[in-house]
Amino acid sequence: MTIMRIGRLVRPAAVALLTLGCAVSVSAQAQQHEHGASVARPARPELGTSAAFAPDGMLYAVSKEGQHVLLHRSTDEGASWYAPVVVNADPEAVSAEGENRPKVAFTTDGGVLVSWTRPLTKRFAGEIRLARSDDGRRFGTPITVHRDRQEITHRFETMAITGQGQVVVAWIDKRDLEASLAEKRDYRGAAIYAALSDDGGRSFRPEVKVGDHSCECCRIAIANDTDGLPLILWRHLFEPNERDHALAKLGADGLPGGVRRATFDRWRVDGCPHHGPSLAVAADGTRHAVWFNERDGEGRVFYGRLQDGRVEAQRTVGGERAAHADIAVSDKRIAIVWKEFDGERTRLRADVSEDGGAQFRSMELAVTAGASDQPRVLRRGALLFAFWRTENEGMKGYWLR
Amino acid sequence: MKRLTCLLAALLCSSATIYAADDFIALDRAGATRVVNAASHTKPTIVALWSSECIHCKKNLKLFADMARVHPQLKLITIAVEPMEEGLAEPLDRLGVSGSRFAYGAEAPEALAHALDPKWRGELPRTILFDGRGGKVAFSGIITETIARASLALSAD
């Protein structure tokens, strides 16, 4: 137990108690009093981790350790891992908890890309960072993806490779909010910006605004449409304060199309849901999505097929405490994974459909008694795979058969 | 010896008034259950859940700090739904937020959240209001002073 911060007057006594080896937990005792003071710093790592299968079938994962992003590789689907590679040689702050996590992607020219959000000193400020490796073992110096270098919010990035082999990075950006505030004008929420790379992540075009008025704090989803162009799905802030989702597509010229409302649950809240969506596009063009919203007073995870102006076959996923779902598609096969706290432990659960989402069968994949990251569902060829990092069990994978 | 040292610990830990006011208490499940037990609140009480990353929380915290100054009988308890880290107190200090300050302890965040409010799904700010007579109501997002006063059964001054 490490004493992080402790009441000024009680510190010597607490240190003495620890020296004596008393079994009494100072923090546990202190919290019984409303004005207790001592805090044992929880030794909890930031668990935000992404994973993806490389074209050669190897499983990669990216996580945070201190002020470094680490790249992990496994040849046995997560049963064991090679010693990690340090992505950023020079230490810097990295966001890797809750809706934030580093991302990994593979370029068409064999490169390995890792992106992350670097928090800056000013509260809520950040930069979108990206590093490239030609061989997955040595990374170049990270670059900042955006041209805007104000010390403001550029956070919650996500990254994908388009069907044309371009790299697309999208993030939540507050330059429009800041400009409005400087002119004493109101601005609802934040904005979504994106940048494209035509050279495998070595450099990026100037960023473009995808849409105004996004929510400020939820992860963004990207999935390629059937023409290979990226669809971006995010939690939006519709007037006056409805935190539903919006969808936009980047054109072949890199410019965004119009912003379309994608969900219609009409959750009105002036707050941060901390709960972003996920999107997968089937070969027939069906847009399968999962998201969280409050509807009729109940916060639930939903699945639905996003149509123009409506949602088809919307239904709840899991139980009352299902959270942070992810979705992937392989032909007619659809897999949804999520985690769900049962009052004592957190369970990793999945719904799998073999018929394009008409019917699902449920399964439980794992359970943990400790803290856990959001689960992901990955593709390796036509196969689907659940990935989940927990504090107690580490990074594990589960084939969805 | 063990009995003696534990007795010493109990004595020290029961001296609540000697602690510095700006420190946080690590919240565990048992503590979370106690904090939101309506029967334990005999005065109007605000339990404000917040985090350093929550841009909307400061509006609520400012309102509650102002209300606590006006109403000495109002009890304010803040819970940072994140582990204690250096600088966590800064937003509370800047806004003049008084009262007991908790931060998430070492247990799983889901377990702590469930103990605080089974209906809460992680959105912030989240506020639980007690009228001091057994009444309890929870709100997500920014709330108005009118709603807070009504929920706390506070008279308008």
Image: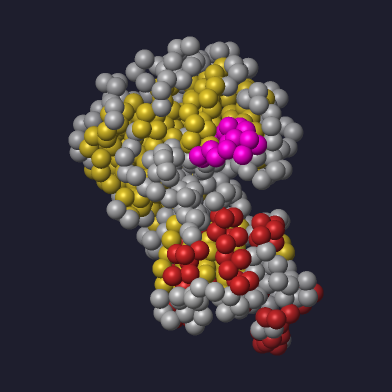
Query: Is B41 placed above or below A274 here?
Result: below
- Left/right of residue A7 with respect to residue A158 in the rendered view: right
- Quarter of the image with the N terminus of chain B in it: bottom right
> How far across and how far down the image is residue A147, in percent?
65, 23
Residue at screen point 49% across, 15% down: A254
Q: Viewer-proximal residue, B127 or A304?
A: B127
Of B55 and A290, the residue lying toward us: B55
Indicate yes or no whether the magenta region holds residue A303: no
- Residue under the point 33% across and 37% down: A263
Q: Quadrant of residue A86?
A: top right
Q: Residue at x 47, y 54 (%)?
A: B141
Q: Which residues are magenta?
A: A172-189
The answer to if A185 sits in the magenta stretch is yes
Residue A48: x and y in percent read 54, 43
Specify the color scheme. Answer: secondary structure
Nearest the eye: A341 or B65:
B65
| Left/right of residue B38 with respect to residue A66 in the rendered view | left
Q: Quadrant of residue B25?
A: bottom right
Residue B68, position as x, y percentages in the image: 60, 71
> Residue at the location (68% across, 72% down)?
A37
Please give left or right for residue B119 compared with residue B47 in the image. left
Label total for image: 0
Residue A333 makes an appearance in the image: no
- Position of the C terminus of chain B by quadrant: bottom right
Question: A55 above or below B28?
Answer: above
Give the quadrant of residue B87. Answer: bottom right
